[in-house]
Image (tube, rainbow, N blue to C red):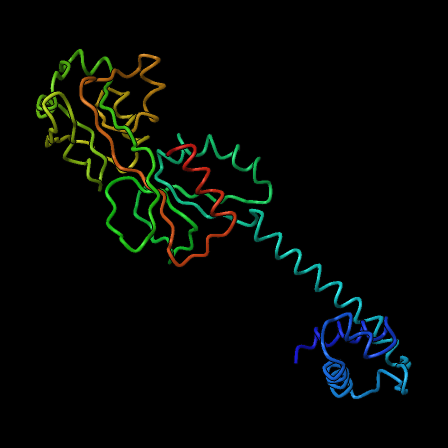
Amino acid sequence: MDRFASMEVFIKVAETGSFTAAADVLGISGQMVGKHIRMLEDHLGVGLLNRTTRQQSLTDAGKDFLERTRIVLAELEAAEALAADSRSRPRGELRVNAPVTFGAFSLAPLLPSYMIDNPDVAVRLTLSDRVVDLVDEGYDCVFRAGPLTDSTLIARGLRPMELIACAAPAYLKARGTPRSPTDLKAHDCLGFAGSAIEDRWEFIGPDGKSTVPVKSRFSANSGLALKQAALAGLGIIFQPAELTQDDIKRGRLVRILPGWRSSRPMHLLFAPDRRLTPKLRSFIEFSAAKFG
């Protein structure tokens, strides 16, 4: 028998003065009221009520127990209300992983607006271009660029990541400006080490898809490092628009092949067996609104 339920019955008997009245208020039988009281008395080893044929009165132990029971049930009610509130309002730490360039240039600038709207959520953002294990590494969700290979995760499709090719004016003056993707074979192309765009760049243009093998004396697994190399005139980079757009506006880099476009799929992933908490749900909705 539930001890908290028995406590509620005991309080009602104390308030109404009889088993019958308590039973009417609670919607149970007088016999069940008696069982609850006996369970409490057996558990405590003391009598809580002085019983007469017409009504019941509290013993000294019953008076003390009544006071404490009201405190306990009030705390229980508060705890349940707090739990219900946490189910309906985003709160707690949200662990997110994202590719470095996307995370630094696209996601991070928008996170303050999410945190203002969700003041009880703390965001822990880690940036990495390796494929992290969402479950084993304890992330709530991860952003992932490129084709998906893990079918065990739930994927929310986002706007593709636009890639553009560009180079410093000094490099283009010395080596010439490519007019089509095939011209890249004769250039130094700064590849992103360890990725699908390290030695093969894919474009879609007037004549359809074009995949070009590229090579260079320098590659790196950092878009920022590649951009610095490009600014120094070391070659052509093929990176997300967010990374290069400011340098293009300022004339430090020049976009090439404007008639061809390229992009990589972008998804937000989370585990199917992970409970969709308010914090995770709110972040998925935020991401879909900003990047969908």
Label count reads: 0
Residue 183, position in %: x, y?
A: 9, 21
Task: Assign the N terminus to one quadrant of the image.
Answer: bottom right
For the point 12% across and 23% down, the residue is 181
Is 148 above or below relative to 178? below
Give the residue drawn at x 11%, y 28%: 210
The image quadrant that residue 171 belongs to is top left
Of residues 244 and 263, the one nearer the viewer is 263
Q: Nearer the viewer, residue 52 or 119?
A: 52
Horizontal placement of 144 versus 56: left or right?
A: left
Nearest to the observer: residue 156 or residue 150: 156
Q: Could you tell whether 193 is left or right of 6 in the image?
A: left
The quarter of the displayed image where residue 121 is located: top right
The percent position of residue 151, horizontal first and vertical second, equals 27, 53
Which image quadrant is residue 237 in? Answer: top left
Q: Is residue 92 left or right of residue 99?
A: right
Q: Does 54 sit above or below residue 188? A: below
Please tell me which residue is depicted at 36% across the width and 43% down the height of the picture.
268
Q: Quadrant of the C terminus?
A: top left
Residue 103 picture location, percent across and down? 39, 36
x, y (%) of residue 195?
22, 40
Q: Is residue 64 above or below residue 259?
A: below
Q: Residue at x 57, y 50 (%)?
A: 88
Residue 259 falls left or right of residue 273: left
